Image (cartoon, rainbow, N blue to C red):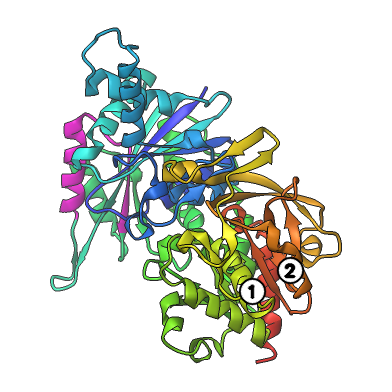
Amino acid sequence: MTRYIFITGGVVSSLGKGLLSAALGTLLQARGYSVRLRKLDPYLNVDPGTMSPYQHGEVYVTDDGAETDLDLGHYERFTGVASQSTDNVTSGRIYQQILTKERRGEYLGATVQVIPHVTDAIKDFALAHTEGIDFVLCEIGGTVGDIESLPFMEAIRQLGTELGPARSCFIHLTLVPYIKAAGELKTKPTQHSVKELRGIGISPNILVCRSEHHIPVSERHKIALFCNVAKSAVIQALDVASIYEVPIAYHAEGLDDEVLKVFGLPAESPVDLSRWRDIVKKLKNPEGEVKIAIVGKYTGLKDAYKSLSEALVHGGIANGVRVKIDWIEAEVFEQEDAINRLEDVHGILVPGGFGQRGTEGKIEAARFAREKFVPYFGICLGMQLAVVEAARNMAGLDGAGSTEFGKPRVPVIGLLTEWATEAGIEIREEEMDLGGTMRLGAYPAELVPGSRVHDIYGCDRISERHRHRYEVNVSYQTALEKAGLKFSGMSPDSRLPEIIELPDHPWYIGVQFHPELKSKPFEPHPLFASFIAAALRQSRLV
């Protein structure tokens, strides 16, 4: 029997519903249950794919090619359960599906309304493809009281009634702020948030209260009394040094016990959190430190590179060191010498991105890394710009550039319109919708024996997740390899360069895919583990 846990938020946004969902999923797994996590987002965009990272953070891509909310990255990193396109939906997608059906006449002339049509579509999404799963955790984006979230709240209210108390549980995450001038914690915001939720028809079973200060038992009892929940069901959530402490902290507060109590399940089974304690121990007791410069376009918002920064932490865990990140806006290098900012770093990473802004600065960072023998990791656009730099300064191809940013004399990067996959021929056209021109999801690559990446992966064939429109033009492969750039990973049909490297460099690798999307704290991605190992060696030379 599949049970459903609905997680809502109140008072303010950014309290950590995604981490709460991921941590609870981990705790249920530790008790031997299977889990699936889902995110229901109220905004009207069809998906996050065309949204600015400054608006919504990174776009997390699944194996099956869905562009999803960054919280799915938390889900996957914590639980190890691969996310799918069926695990994230937005109001935009719900309305798109409904209006498509209406245009086709599938409603047989009925008036299309929020209730029942929109709420039924949301319920269908929540319930689909959950056979054999013990617990499905559904996080509702936004904050209770937002007008956009009302259809989702109504849908989960209906689900709670239809499933019954034996199969449904509502967890509400709120804020208990500390008023410094008064020296007091205030429970009133939580009371009003629960009142708002109950006004919609949802009575939470468990309250999780974020706070910067310890919440005394007396205050928790007060919250329980005014919010009509059990005293033991008021769970405090204090700040922790690392997100990987969250499962341990929630277990210590009894969150998983309370959830099982709601469902009438025994809570006596042992909970093995040893791997999380081991990770936390390594993070708190590093044997050294490396400094990595991330030269990007959206460095003003760290969530724009959330999976990337976490993958670097995982690489540090694999090597027993702390990774200190120096966030550098790429445009800096278009006004000043790169050495002013990069001379003391142990590794340089240029991540993916779209648009021309900052590209010349990223090229300068790649050039600095190549000439100064500093470990370099180029991801997606970071690989493409490393190829442009090599074309200009190693192969002597003046005017080399990407057609993404205009019409260069030497288009070493271009929009490939047709290529072969295991499923058949894929075709792209420039005038298609932006999402339609993407190469999205998992694609295979074949590695060249004897190459550095072949040694790192330890296999001949890999599968990694992609999110990009433009490709390295294979027509220039011969000229670039004569100049010293090695194409060490290719698509099975040899038309799409996937990995480049410099054999005579301590560590210089560019990949067309996004390896950070598959890295986990207990299973660091081999490329990030190897990159941080190279940075550690570099730190001993500086």
Distance of label 2 from label 1 (alpha carbons): 9 Å
Horizontal relation, residue 283 to residue 136: left or right: right
Which residue is painted at 36% across and 33% down in the image?
93
Q: Looking at this rendering, what residue extends furthest in the right direction? A: 450
Instruction: Residue at 72% x, 49% y: name it.
Output: 491
Q: Secondary structure at mark 2?
A: helix
Instruction: Measuring from the top left, give residue 106's x and y in whole percent.
Output: 35, 12
User: On the picture, is 374 further left or further right than 210?
Assistant: right
Question: Quick check: 483 above or below 243?
Answer: below
- Where residue 52 sits: x, y (%)? 36, 56
Say if residue 295 shows up in the picture: yes
Q: Quadrant of residue 440?
A: top right
Specify few, some or many for label 2: CA neighbours under 10 Å numbering under 14, 14-19, or 20 or more. some
The residue at 67%/33% (across/down) is: 424
- In magenta, the rendered stretch is 187-210
Q: Is residue 190 highlighted in magenta?
A: yes
The quadrant of the image that shows the C terminus is bottom right
Residue 76 placement (x, y as % from top left): 55, 47
- The residue under label 2 is 479
The reply to whether dot 2 and dot 1 touch (C-beta < 8 Å) is yes
Going from N to C along the chain, the mark reached first, 2 or 1, is: 1
User: What residue did someone put label 1 on?
Assistant: 397
Image coordinates for residue 356, horizontal then vertical, percent: 43, 66
Residue 184 against residue 469 in the figure, above or below = below
Direction front: furthest residue: 409
Give the residue type at disc 2: Ala
Q: Which mark is residue 252?
A: none
> Is residue 301 rendered to the left or right of residue 486?
left
Question: At label 1, which amino acid type do we have?
Answer: Leu
